[in-house]
Amino acid sequence: MKRLTSRQKQAIATKFKILEIAFSLFKSKGYDSVKVQDICDAAEISVGAFYHHFNSKLEIINTGYEQVDTLLIERYESKTHNDYRQMIIDLMGEGGNLLEELGWPFVSEVYKNLMTLDNKYTLSENRPVYIELKHALMHAMEIGAIEQTHSPDSLAMTIMRLSRGAIFDWCLNKGSYKLKDRILEDINLVIPIL
């Protein structure tokens, strides 16, 4: 693999800095209240530098959504899983925990803005979360831990859809319940063995 130059490393660091600061501002002030200039001032960069990394404030939401998945997979992979059933519980439960940490106001803004993006990352079968979930389901079916009434693809897509619905409901209810618990309850309806 080709090594990154110091300039490339600096560009990546700046992009992550912009993301981190923008998310912090969105979380504390609300997405609509934050201007690109606010992000630039807090990150101590020029507006031109912002637009070098992002086409718009909205693009930060999409890029950030992908970063949330990366963080989720890192947390998931750092745990020891006793079996495939536990892998599914850990993966989806950790997703609920991570979104609770971000808070329902911020997650609501993300969901609202995902509706206006052309990039449908959230629906992609190439998302790391979807791939890990499908892998765990496939192996659980192979060893008989889950009855194979549907394909791993179909079941993974159903679980992802249920999770998105639980997240949306959690936002509508202003975070009044534990998201992880609701996601796992919904998954138990689809896969009773969990």
Image (cartoon, rainbow, N blue to C red):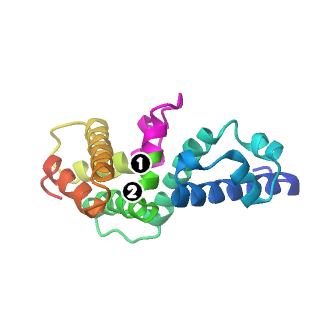
Q: Which residues are magenta?
A: 110-130
Q: In the rendering, which numbered label is found on residue 108?
A: 1
Identify which residue is drawn at 54% across, 57% down.
29
Q: Is residue 15 visible?
A: no
Amino acid residing under circle 1: Ser
Find the distance from the CA under tag 2 to the CA under tag 1: 6 Å
Q: Is residue 100 visible?
A: yes
Report if the CB atoms under discs 2 and 1 are less than 8 Å apart.
yes
Residue 14: x, y in percent?
76, 55
Q: Residue furthest front?
A: 33
Residue 55: x, y in percent?
70, 36
- The crowding category of the residue bearing disc 1, from other C-alpha atoms within 10 Å (few below 14, some 14 to 19, many at least 20), is some
> Where 86 sits versus 152, above or below?
below
Q: In the rendering, which numbered label is found on residue 46?
A: none
Q: Quadrant of residue 115?
A: top left
120 falls in the magenta region? yes
- The crowding category of the residue bearing disc 2, from other C-alpha atoms within 10 Å (few below 14, some 14 to 19, many at least 20), is many
Identify which residue is drawn at 63% across, 42% down.
57
Amino acid residing under circle 2: Trp
Instruction: Decide which of 145, 128 is in the foreground and name it.
Output: 128
Instruction: Decide which of 71, 181 is in the foreground and name it.
Output: 181
Taking the image as shown, residue 22 lies to the left or right of residue 167, namely right
Tell me the quadrant of the picture where the C terminus can be found: bottom left
Q: In the rendering, which numbered label is found on residue 104?
A: 2
